[in-house]
Image (spheres, rainbow, N blue to C red):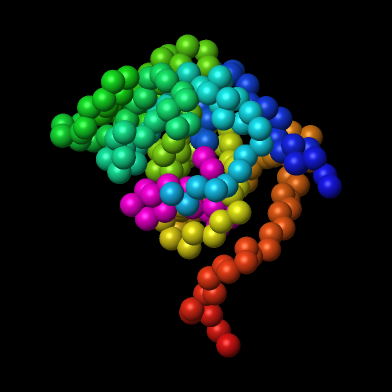
């Protein structure tokens, strides 16, 4: 059997990057309906992955909807502690918390503030909406995804841009930069059957 780490990307580095970082379902969702994250329960990542990101993250930039869904949630199950910035047009009424700052500014300014607070480590973006805005502004250094063997079918998509032009990406690592990433799965025993399929 192949070593599972051989198909993974190189370890993340703390290089002052603006990093759009998510675990994503195979069908492109980074959260379920109402920002639910329970779908990640039971999925496995390579050993040391959480510690890798805990050590390379200096600050986190989030959106208000995700914050409101669970103000008690912290990155990496609470293993990471540091400044969290929540970008919102309406900071009034937001649930306050220690080490959390609510920003009412444009995304570029939020990145400037977040990078300064990160102190040379990475600023992780944990918001699909903000990530899309930063991508359009040319302010993302990397998109770092972990694809989970789950099909959600509904929720918050990583990238939703109806009518927009495709955005070409370049793979980071040993593969050719335009190589297709191949994945292969089988449905788990007892997986539900779609009810709206054709005969």
Query: 175 left or right of 154?
Result: right
Q: Which residue occupies the extreme bottom position in the image? A: 199
Query: Does residue 124 appear anywhere in the picture?
Result: yes
Q: Residue 103, percent across and down? A: 28, 26
- Say which residue appears at 28% left-offset and 20% top-offset: 98
- Say which residue appears at 49% left-offset and 59% top-offset: 152
Q: Residue 160, percent across and down? A: 46, 53
Query: 49 left or right of 87?
Result: right
Q: Quadrant of residue 198?
A: bottom right
Q: Quadrant of residue 27?
A: bottom right
- Say which residue appears at 40% left-offset and 43% top-offset: 129
Query: 175 left or right of 141?
Result: right
> Magenta residues?
22-37
Q: Residue 183, percent across and down? A: 71, 54
Query: Does residue 17 appear anywhere in the picture?
Result: no
* Viewer-proximal residue among 65 and 37: 37
Query: 92 left or right of 168?
Result: left
Q: Which residue occupies the extreme top position in the image? A: 119
Q: Which residue occupies the extreme left position in the image? A: 93
Q: Residue 69, percent across and down? A: 30, 43
Residue 98 is inside the magenta segment: no
């Amino acid at each position: 059997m192949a070593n599972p780490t051989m198909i993974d990307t190189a370890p993340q580095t703390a290089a002052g990057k603006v990093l759009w970082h998510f675990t994503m379902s195979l069908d492109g969702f980074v959260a379920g309906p109402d920002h639910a994250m329970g779908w990640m329960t039971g999925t496995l990542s390579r050993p040391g992955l959480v510690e890798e990101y805990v050590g390379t993250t200096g600050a986190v930039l989030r959106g208000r909807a995700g914050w409101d869904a669970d103000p008690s949630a912290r990155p990496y199950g609470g293993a990471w502690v540091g400044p969290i910035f929540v970008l919102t047009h309406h900071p009034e009424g937001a649930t306050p918390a220690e080490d959390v700052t609510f920003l009412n500014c444009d995304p570029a300014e939020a990145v400037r503030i977040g990078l300064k607070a990160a102190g040379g480590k990475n600023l992780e973006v944990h918001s699909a909406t903000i990530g899309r805005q930063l991508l359009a502004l040319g302010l993302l250094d990397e998109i770092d995804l972990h694809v989970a063997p789950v099909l959600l079918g509904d929720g918050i998509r990583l990238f939703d841009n109806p009518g927009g032009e495709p955005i070409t990406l370049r793979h980071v690592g040993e593969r050719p930069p335009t190589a297709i990433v191949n994945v292969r799965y089988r449905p788990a025993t007892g997986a539900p059957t779609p009810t709206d399929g054709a005969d």
